[in-house]
Structure formats: C-alpha cells, structure tokens
Amino acid sequence: MTDVRKSCPGGTAFEARRERARKMVAYLKKAYPAPKSELAYRTLFQFVVSVILSAQCTDRRVNECTATLFKKYKTAEDFAEADPATFAKEISSIPFFNNKAKNIIAAAKEIQARHGGAVPRSEAALVALPGIGYKTAHVVLGELFDIWEGIATDTHVKRFALRFDLTDNADPTKISKDLEALVPKRDWKYVNNGLVLYGRYVCSARPHSCADHPLTRIWPEAANRWLKAKGCVYSLPR
C-alpha cells in the first residue's frame, strides 16, 4: 500500500451524518434484531468479569479463559474472596491480566460491600467500581438488564464511526456522545452489538475490498477510508 492520503474525519454537516446514521441503524436492526453479547457467562457478575477481561482482547480468547475460570468463581462473593496471585495466574492468558485481576477482585468487594452482592443497575453505580468505565457500564446495563442509557464504543464502534464520518473524535466516550446525538434513543440498543457483529463477521479491520458490503453501499466513500492509530483515517489511493 503506497501513497496513502491521511485525513482526520470531519466536515460533514450534522444532518448528513444523522441521515447516514439512520440508514446504517436501519440495516443493523434488520441484520441483528436481538442484540446479545457473544461473551459466555452464567451469572450476572460473571458477565461483568468477562467484559472487563475483554478490553483489548477478543471475545473468543476471553471465553476460552472463562470456560475454566467460571467453574470455580460464580458470584461476586467468590471473586471477592479470590487470592490475588492465584487469580492473576488463572487469567494470565488475557492481556494486562495483573491490572484486570486487581480490578475484578476490587469491584467484587465493592459490590459485596455496597450492593449486597448484586450488580448495580445504573451507570453512576457501575462506573464507580474499579475497572469499569462508560463503555463497560453500558455493555453491562444493556446485556443484563435491557437498559439502554448510552452507546458503548469499543474498537469496532470506533472504527465504523470514523470510517463512516459520524464523529470528529478519537476518544471512545466522546464518540459515544456523538453517536447518541445522531441516533434516536430507541435505537441505541442496536448500535454497539450490531457494529461488533458486523465488524467481526462482515467487514474486518484489515483493509480489503468492501464496496459490496451492506453498510458501504449506504456510503460508498467508506470503502476507501480505514482507521489508523490516534483516531485518524487514511484513504486508499484510487
């Protein structure tokens, strides 16, 4: 790949972005009508753990780890009582396992102490827990409680938001706020899981020919725009 033209996304009028987002969400609603995470879990806190582990890690790798882990640890109490060194070793196949182990155990202890062992049902309560930010909180609320008070921005959502020029930001929380301004609240539930599944099974991150992909047909310019580091896109030479 040579002579790529670097450009930061921007310049599109708000109304044009909103109409493009409307068409994209209409497709996602039809393609993925029942948004569900592909992370495996049996208890509510196990899902919280899986989401924390999934940061900068694939769902497949997380599921491979938790297949054994969740036989031993089921409730928040189980995780709260885990030996830190042992637990870190048990999740050592996951990137940043030491920090994630500390956060998971600390979050479990907080839930035990402040919420009676139950996963809280509000953004404010969730983001107050160690290891849980805006994205994780809204993934948890949507998956576990069908509460859609925000749009979670992970790597897939960020990638498509930038490729389809729906934001001028690189920060995930700011991207979430931009998308929330473009998409009616009743449709927020379709954005994260829809784009995750679309990015996983239809249009991967590696530059490739995607002119015939459903979302690209909505806005053909996206076929030549690909995400680079630091929140910019580069355009393929025509």
Image (cartoon, helix red, strand yellow):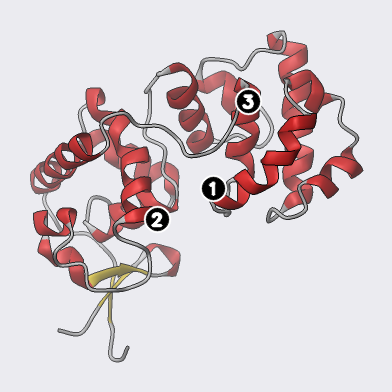
In-front residue for pair 7/150: 150
In this rendering, the answer to whether 39 lies above or below 231 is above
Disc 1 marks which residue?
59
Q: Residue at x 39, y 62 (%)?
A: 231
Distance (Cα) linking label 2 and label 1: 23 Å
Q: Secondary structure at mark 3?
A: loop
The answer to which quarter of the image holds residue 217 is bottom left
228 is higher (above) or lower (below) than 75:
below
Question: Residue 12: percent from the left, percent from the top?
Answer: 13, 55
Single out the residue that lies furthest toward the bottom.
2
| Residue type, label 1 | Asp
Earlier residue among tags 2 and 3? 3
Tag 2: amino acid = Ala
Residue bearing the label numbered 2: 170
Mark 1 or mark 2, which is nearer the start of the sequence? 1
Kind of residue at badge 3:
Ala
> Is 199 located above or below residue 32 in the figure?
below
Considering the numbered disc 1 on the image, is that residue within a helix, a strand or a loop? helix
- Disc 1 residue crowd, few under 14, some 14–19, many 20+, Cα 10 Å: some
The C terminus: image quadrant:
bottom left
Residue at horizontal 37 percent and vertical 65 percent from the top: 205
Q: Where does the image place residue 210, in percent across and percent down from the top left?
A: 21, 67
Please tell me which residue is depicted at 90% across the width and 44% down the height of the picture.
85
- Which is more foreground, mark 1 or mark 3? 1
Kindly identify which residue carries mark 3: 128
Q: Secondary structure at mark 2?
A: loop
187 with respect to 81 (left or right): left
Marks 2 and 3 sit apart, C-alpha to C-alpha, by: 23 Å
Count residues near mark 2 (Cα–Cα under 10 Å), then give few for <14, some for 14-19, many for 20+: some
Disc number lying in front (2 or 1): 1
